[in-house]
Image (cartoon, grey):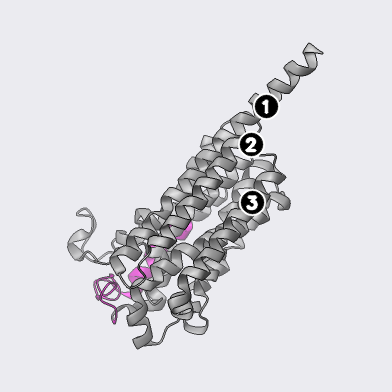
Amino acid sequence: CCSEPVSGEAPTQPGPAGRLLLMPASFPSPRRLVLPAGTWLLYLPCTWSIGLAAEPGCLPDWHMLSLFGVGAVLMRGAGCTINDLWDRDYDKQVARTAGRPLAAGEISTFQSFVFLGGQLSLALCVLLCLNYYSIILGAASLSLVVTYPLMKRITYWPQLVLGLTFNWGALLGWSAIQGSCNWSVCLPLYFAGVMWTLVYDTIYAHQDKRDDIVIGVKSTALKFKEDTKQWLSGFSTAMVLGLCVAGMNCDQTFPYYSAVAAIGAHLAHQIYTLDIDKPEDCWKKFASNRTVGVLLFIGIMLGNLWKRKNSETVEETLESR
């Protein structure tokens, strides 16, 4: 849709009064660039990968979780800044996004580039804290970050490109812990994340479908139309299958699969109760996907701790013999 799906903005857009009081009036507000919903949806796939890469019986590396958290905030903000630069003319035509700083004329294009340079510089500092394999892998995602906002102009599948971009952490988190990717785990996890993004961002795109038709941009919401729920059901099924394959390939245990089952139930309820013609309901369903990501992370942590319990049970059985 014309309004960047990763921006995580509710149907009503806050005005200039929402900027931080300590920021100079002429400087870009970090605003809405670091809103919780979009930041969480970028960060959570990183946590899944970091959690799955932990040693059996161990909690995830909290240092890496913190580092990736900072990186998610910075790259989430950079992505929104890039989007606002690409879409400033489109945003003026959509009620929900007309209050964005560039669209509203609160800041200049030059100021936005300065702000973007600062965000990317700090993000590079975070990336350089990782191993060489991860630095190269992380840098490879930048082309997706830059080009994603253009996709809505040329394809009805910009949400797919967003999924490829937003779930890069599913690859990067594992390599940051292990030094390289175990593709038998990382690829199914990445695939599951992409399917998840197609679910929540198609729902998000239904908020703006009327405006999108008028100004001529594309989205999966416009492609699927009244068949949206069938498509979302297919994506949800594919996500659950991808999570199961990833779990099997790294010997996950009962708590993990319980979380996957809970995620399946959550998505089923979300899709069943969705009203694609009510922007408020679309926003509510979109935002609820943070719960999906947190559930999986908890399941990964508990499943990893359960591995130790299973291992100790096997050892005790062998000793008793």
Please give the name of the residue rendered at 21% of the width and 53% of the height, measured from the top-left corner.
Answer: 22
Residue 121: image location, x then y, percent: 47, 57
Tell me whether the residue at label 1 lies in contact with that at label 2, contact meaning CB atoms closer than 8 angstroms.
yes
Residue furthest toward the left? 17
Q: Earlier in the sequence, mark 3 or mark 2?
A: 3
Please give the name of the residue rendered at 33% of the width and 59% of the height, measured from the top-left corner.
Answer: 284
Give how far apart the Cα atoms at labels 3 and 2 are.
Answer: 27 Å
Q: Amino acid at mark 3?
A: Ser
Q: Secondary structure at mark 2?
A: loop
* Residue underneath mark 2: 253
100 inside magenta stretch: yes
Count of marks placed on residues? 3
Q: Quadrant of the N terminus?
A: bottom left
Give neighbour class at mark 2: few <14, some 14-19, many 20+ (Cα, 10 Å): some
89 inside magenta stretch: no
Q: Is residue 225 visible?
A: yes
Q: Amino acid at mark 2?
A: Thr
Residue 158: image location, x then y, percent: 50, 74
Give how far apart the Cα atoms at labels 1 and 2 are.
Answer: 9 Å
Please give the name of the residue rendered at 35% of the width and 65% of the height, measured from the top-left corner.
Answer: 282
Residue 134 image label = 3
Q: Nearer the viewer, mark 3 or mark 2?
A: 2
* Residue underneath mark 1: 310
The magenta stretch spans which residues?
93-122
Residue 273: image location, x then y, percent: 38, 61
Residue 282 image label = none
Tell me whether the residue at label 3 lies in contact with that at label 1, contact meaning CB atoms closer than 8 angstroms.
no
Q: Is residue 222 above or below residue 319?
A: below
Q: Nearer the viewer, mark 3 or mark 1?
A: 1
Residue 162 as seen in the image, left or right of residue 288 = right
Give neighbour class at mark 3: few <14, some 14-19, many 20+ (Cα, 10 Å): many
